Image (cartoon, helix red, strand yellow):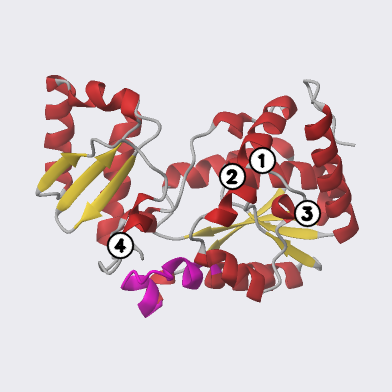
Amino acid sequence: MVNTREPLNTELREKLDRLEAYIKDLGSLAIGFSGGVDSSFLLAVAHEVLGDSVIAVTGADASVPERELKEAKAFCNERGIRHIVCTVDPLKEEEYRHNSPDRCYFCKHGIFTEVKKIADENGIMYMAEGSNMDDIGDYRPGLKAAAELAVKSPLRACGLYKNDIRMISKAMGLPTWSKPAYACLASRFVYGEEITEEKLRMIDEAEQFLIENGFLEERVRMHGKMARIEVPARDILRLAEDKMREAVYEKFKKIGFMFVTLDLKGYKQGSMNATLN
């Protein structure tokens, strides 16, 4: 049984017990590890249950900020978890590069193909990813790729929602329990706009600037030469203050954006999906 630093209510304890039993039955596992809330929780529980029969595999490409890769490495190092970083290049896929609505399918298919190779090389029987019950209602073409490659989804199989994962992660003492939601930088483009390494770099640099200025929940959406900034409603006034507004505008101009806008609706996860029918 996974020990927690804080007591769990009956419902959460039962869900954690189900997850442990599910993972134990698999015997060995290669987890697609991004370093986010969900995959960190899944990896930590799996390592408690299976020990060295678990490996974490992280796909590194231009859509993954260096800060996320560093955090993923640190998480594994601190816990003695085997961690393999593989280099992938989804920009080789035309559908990904042209940002079709099913872009995520091609990216995930490429990543989990690499995970499968690594799993086979290390004698690992199964692969897993960290989607949860809340992901079922969203547009997630990447889940189709995972299903085609027989990737397990333990958190969904055991009925775990995002809030469950955060609460259990907190009880386990995981530093990721309060980490803001994150999606790869390719999700910042309006569908149909070409994705390039240069554009990914621009978004990465712009978002890093916002993070360094205290906007931990943020997105910089790219619409051609225009940057559309999303922050939670509570942070809009702070970002619009003269000194901060001017600093953001000047930085974004240096990065390469011609226009810089602030979305008055506020931050919304997956807002680019609003353009889909």
Nearer to us in this view, 125 or 14: 14
Q: Which mark is residue 77?
A: 1
The residue positioned 71% from the left and 47% from the top of the image is 43
- The magenta span reads 93-108
Residue 245 in the image: above or below residue 50: above
Q: Which mark is residue 54?
A: 3
Whether pointer 3 and pointer 4 mark residues with C-beta atoms closer than 8 Å, the reply is no
* Residue 89 spot, x, y in % from top left: 44, 69
Q: How many marks?
A: 4
Q: Residues within 10 Å of mark 3 (few under 14, many from 20)?
A: many
| Quadrant assignment for the C terminus | bottom left
Nearer to us in this view, 223 or 203: 223
Q: Mark 4 is on which residue type?
A: Glu
- For the question of whether residue 109 can be seen, the reply is yes
Q: Mark 3 is on which residue type?
A: Val
Work out whether mark 3 precedes mark 4 in sequence or the reverse, and give the earlier one. Answer: 3
Q: Mark 1 is on which residue type?
A: Asn
Local SS, label 2 = helix
Please give the residue where the numbered disc 2 appears in the rendered image.
73
Marks 2 and 1, how far apart in space?
A: 6 Å
Please give the residue where the numbered disc 4 appears in the rendered image.
197
